[in-house]
Image (tube, rainbow, N blue to C red):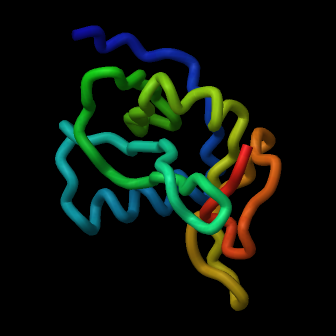
């Protein structure tokens, strides 16, 4: 199994990186796990984003962003290329946000999209 680290097709802002490291420490996630970024069918617009810590699976590409291991299924790359993940901690919203240039439309909550 290859462990080559490639150039990441997604961008994590400094706010997202900081929050992800905080979550990883709080949940005591081992170094065997990395951040999984992907898509799955569902949501009000057709596809939903996947963001969570997971182990590497067959068919995954591995990237390193600010020292954080990131896993993504190769087939998801065409939906996520150029996407930016940010973390908002404001009065009106708190959580991860997704800015995807490949999305033809998004739902009101911003967690699902169509292409």
Q: Residue furthest bottom?
A: 91
Depth order, front residue of 16/74:
74
Q: Quadrant location of residue 8?
A: top right
Q: How many marks?
A: 0
Q: Is residue 34 above or below residue 59?
A: below
Residue 96 in the image, given as x and y percentages of width and height: 58, 65
Residue at 23%, 65% (x, y): give it: 27
Q: Quadrant location of residue 44?
A: bottom right
Residue at 60%, 79% (x, y): give it: 94
Q: Quadrant of the C terminus?
A: top right
> Can I make out residue 86 in this image?
no
Residue 3 in the image, given as x and y percentages of width and height: 30, 14
Residue 61 in the image, given as x and y percentages of width and height: 41, 22
Residue 58 in the image, given as x and y percentages of width and height: 26, 23
Residue at 58%, 53% (x, y): give it: 47
Depth order, front residue of 94/45:
45
Image position of 108 (left or right of 17):
right
Image position of 114 (left or right of 28):
right
Image position of 114 (left or right of 60):
right
Residue at 21%, 54% (x, y): give it: 29
Image position of 80 (left or right of 51):
right
Q: Quadrant of the N terminus?
A: top left
Depth order, front residue of 89/60:
60
> Can I make out residue 44 in this image?
yes
Q: Is residue 2 above or below residue 110?
A: above
Q: Is residue 107 above or below residue 1?
A: below
């Amino acid at each position: 199994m290859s462990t080559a680290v490639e150039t990441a097709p997604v961008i994590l802002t400094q706010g997202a990186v900081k929050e992800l490291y905080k979550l990883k420490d709080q949940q005591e996630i081992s170094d065997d796990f990395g951040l999984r970024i992907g898509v799955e069918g569902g949501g009000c617009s057709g596809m939903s984003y996947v963001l969570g810590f997971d182990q590497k699976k067959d068919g995954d590409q591995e990237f390193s962003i600010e020292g954080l291991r990131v896993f993504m299924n190769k087939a998801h790359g065409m939906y996520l290329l150029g996407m930016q993940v940010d973390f908002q901690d404001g009065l009106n919203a708190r959580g991860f946000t997704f800015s995807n240039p490949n999305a033809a439309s998004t739902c009101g909550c911003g967690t699902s999209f169509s292409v």
